[in-house]
Amino acid sequence: MRSAGVIRRAVVVALAVAFVTGGIGLAAPADASTDTAPTPAPAPAIPAIVDPIVRHVFRLDALNGVRYTPNARNVALRTSPDAPLLLFLPATRAVPENYREFLDTAGSAGYHVLALDYWNRGRSVAQTCARDARCYSDLQANRFDGSHPTRFSSIAPSDSIRARLVHALGTLATRDPMGGWGRFLDGDRIRWDRIVLAGHSQGGGESAFIAHGRRVQGVLLFGSPVESDQGVTAAWMAHPGVTPMSRYYALDSAHDMYAQRIAGSWHALRLPGTPRTIATSAPTRVGHQLVTDYALGTAGQSHSRFISDRGPRGRRDIPLFRGVWLAMLNAVRGPLVSS
């Protein structure tokens, strides 16, 4: 006869798949990839989830007369109410729902997750700034908090990443009062020390910029930053930031169209160690600079397929890079100890 504990675990697994909070829709399933792939190595064991995964997909409502533009659907999920928050910022012209597999993996690893839409439309930061070192600093500051407006970017403070994050966390705290979302705010002040920043391409560069001036729990960079061009790097990288480099982990493809610019940015950031080549399996000890040599298609496709939902899949339709994602997520899940 089954014990109550076994029955409870079975119910939890079923709930994790089916549970949706009232009035909040589920994201549509990811499209199946047409890429073929060899049998992957077993992924690292996923931490046991005691609580069901609660998922929210929502747009930001107008606030104090501010209508957010753009306003694609944000994706949030959580398990236990005391988990750290993973804040994910998408690449240029990408939206949160392009990264459902990675976000679900972060949730399974025990994170609160919020993938946030923001002003990432138009030309990329890499194309806009090129070899103008100061441009990166001004543009990224403007998109973060509305300061330093220029002809390249003039986001209002009320429509900035910071304002959107405060509004999104407040919305989640209201809609999911038992979810622990309020732990990441102290009034309108963001508790950065409880947040892991992650992002792809422009979103990764923005994450690194934010972490440079605010002490966060960790930083995960995917195909980013693209802020080095023929020896010229973003001006803000010229001096050390406040988040320890030991809490940064980065992944790129050797075939990425921006591979050289990303490598230059990693060097300018002073990421620990040297680039370590992998295929799709997580290394025994995750390095701070990971470069996959797995064939992902064209140089443009290689800039995103190791993190987006269009990436290669293996047995049971599991993303081939899931084990690498888990290794990176687990590396920064513990709290940052003050020095």
Image (cartoon, helix red, strand yellow):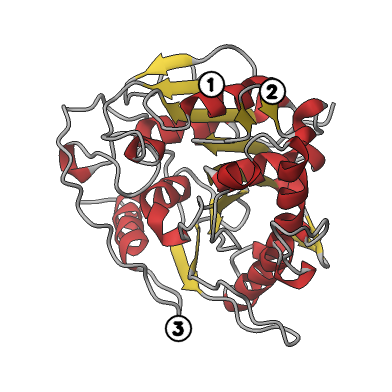
Numbered mark located on residue 308 in the image: none
Residue nearest the observer in this picture, 259 or 118: 259
* Mark 1 and mark 3: Cα distance apart in space: 41 Å
Numbered mark located on residue 268 in the image: 2
Question: In which image quadrant can residue 210 be found?
Answer: top right
Residue nearest the observer in this picture, 10 or 131: 131
Residue in the image at 37% along x and 29% along y: 44
Mark sitting earlier along the chain (1/3): 3
Camera sees residue 13? yes
Name the mark nearer the viewer: 1 or 2: 2
Mark sitting earlier along the chain (3/2): 3
Q: What residue does disc 3 label?
A: 23
Give the amino acid at mark 3: Gly
Camera sees residue 52? no
In what element is the residue under mark 2? helix
Above or below residue 296? Residue 199 is below
